[in-house]
Amino acid sequence: MKKILILSLLAMSAGLLLALQLAKDPGYVLIAYSGWTFETSLFALLILIVLIVIALRLVYLLLAWLNPLRFFRSSNKNTNTQ
């Protein structure tokens, strides 16, 4: 219980320090490739990366859950053990 409290306080402190730093200077990210440009603040890019990682994880879990081969493999394991 103490460990969770300490980790929560550390995470909130790090978030507060990051928010204060980003309020002073939000940063600037420019990505240019073959005539295309993408520019945003550092905070928006970090949020975008987190959302993409969450979306990819959800797609992976959905595909693993919908995988028809898992039923085939589980039925083969039962027949091979007899």
Image (cartoon, rainbow, N blue to C red):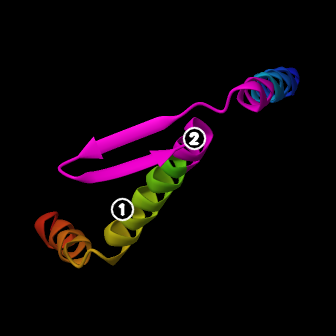
Q: Residues within 10 Å of mark 1 (few under 14, many from 20)?
A: few
Image quarter of the C terminus: bottom left
Front-lying residue, 63 or 53: 53
**Alpha carbon distance from label 2 to label 1:** 29 Å
Q: Is residue 48 left or right of residue 31?
A: right
Front-lying residue, 35 or 72: 35
Q: Is residue 17 magenta?
A: no
Q: Which mark is residue 38?
A: none
Residues drawn in magenta: 18-47
Disc 2 marks which residue? 41
Q: Earlier in the sequence, mark 2 or mark 1?
A: 2
Horizontal and vertical percent position of residue 67: 27, 74
Mark in front: 2 vs 1: 2
Residue name at image x 59 percent, y 30 percent: 27
Element at badge 1? helix
Horizontal and vertical percent position of residue 14: 75, 23
Residue name at image x 40 percent, y 71 percent: 62
10 relative to 52, above or below: above
Disc 1 marks which residue? 60
Q: Is residue 30 left or right of residue 33?
A: right
Residue name at image x 79 percent, y 22 percent: 17
Q: Quadrant of residue 68?
A: bottom left
Horizontal and vertical percent position of residue 33: 22, 46
